[in-house]
Amino acid sequence: MKSVLFDSRSKLTRWCAIGDQQNQQQHRRTLAGILPQQPRRTLWKKAALLVVPQQQTEPQRWEQPRLRFMQYERPHDPVKRLGLVSDDGSKMVELSTSTCAANDMVTFIRQRYCMDSLLDRLQFMQVRDVYKDLRLLPPIDDPCKILVVQNNYVDNCDEQHIPIPREPSFCVKFSSSITGSLDNIRAHSQAKHIDYGCQLVVVIGRKCRKVNRNAAMNYVFGYTLAQDITARDWTALLGGKSLDTFCPLGPTIVHKTHVPDVNDLWIKTLVNGEQRQSGHTRDMIFKIDYLVHRLSQFLTLFPGDLILTGTPAGGGAYRRPTSFLQPGDRIDSEIQILGKMSNKVVNDLS
């Protein structure tokens, strides 16, 4: 088995993380807008679909093909498809046509496809260049539930001057708020104080009810990232977190086997090139295994459900002076290994 895996992986080009967002206005919702172009001397040099580890202490680990899933549409073909994409967004495999995999991510997760078998079969699949005008969709667009953990980072509690919570508290977002990793965020006229918050997202892989903490990670499929856009002048129950486009998600879902330690990832948010958030998942108060265990005690989690695990310090509401989002702002979000998103805030009528 190991020799087959090694042989199949060695035949594929090493995938690393680069890309550029400067043509996003022209190539909205496409991978073409974030493929490699000329390097730029900024913090976001070669703004990437995914991030190459800063220190590759184990180079052989990064040479392996990753289980990085994307939903997309071919050029001039409005049929949703499922595929694997390389870290730099240049190579892909169409699972929808190469295997018995479903066309959408939630159904694929429910199929309980064996990931080892999928990696074995890569040697027999066509690895091709990504379609030039491929339309990148959110990696999950219609989950049963989107659950958001509140005040789950120590520094976020500190900036609010509130005590560290003893138990997690949750709120919800609606699936209609989901938008893509390159799509615009609409600044709704009803919301005057629009805030941001980059969050690691857990994707549930199996039906989950009353699981103990030791077994909780067995029910996780993988991870992605989201911006938890919030109208601070609305309550969460009245839609402050669920206005249309208030949940940018993506760009891909990375299977949990390719995230060596989910509690050792850095998080960044830039607004108009200014770094606003710089945190680390080790500072989560309630870890992922506990969150899955806790939620499963009082509701059933289904494949494809999303858990947004909290955001570090740096939100606009807690800056002095406050700094809320306005039309024309651009938000760049990044989590180590998982990827980057770039979303522009636009007028509600544009």
Image (cartoon, grey):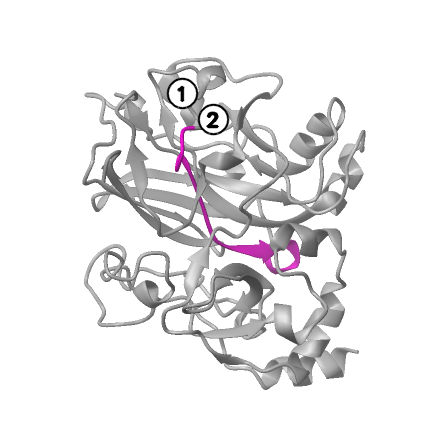
Is the residue 39 above or below the residue 301 in the image?
below
Q: CA distance from mark 1 to mark 2?
A: 6 Å
Is the residue 205 above or below the residue 322 in the image?
below
Residue type marked 2: Val
Position of 166 compared to 229: left or right? right
Q: Position of residue 111 (x, y in %)?
A: 76, 56
Q: Which residue is mark 1?
A: 158
**Answer yes or no: do the residues labelled 1 and 2 have beta carbons within 8 Å?**
yes
> Which type of secondary structure does the marked residue at label 1 adopt?
helix
Q: Position of residue 327 (x, y in %)?
A: 20, 36
Q: Which residue is mark 2?
A: 154
Query: Which residue is at a point 31% across and 71% down the rendered structure image?
Result: 36
Quadrant assignment for the N terminus = bottom right
> Which type of secondary structure does the marked residue at label 2 adopt?
helix
Disc 2 crowd rating (10 Å Cα; few below 14, some 14-19, many 20+) is: some
Query: Which residue is at a point 71% across and 39% down the rendered structure image?
Result: 302
Residue 5: mark in rendering: none
Res 163 seen here: yes
In this view of the protein, which residue sits in the foreground, 133 or 223?
Answer: 133
Does residue 315 show up magenta in the picture? no
Q: Position of residue 307 (x, y in %)?
A: 59, 36
Res 238 → quadrant: top left
Quadrant assignment for the C terminus = top left
Position of 127 compared to 346: left or right? right
First to last magenta residue range: 243-259
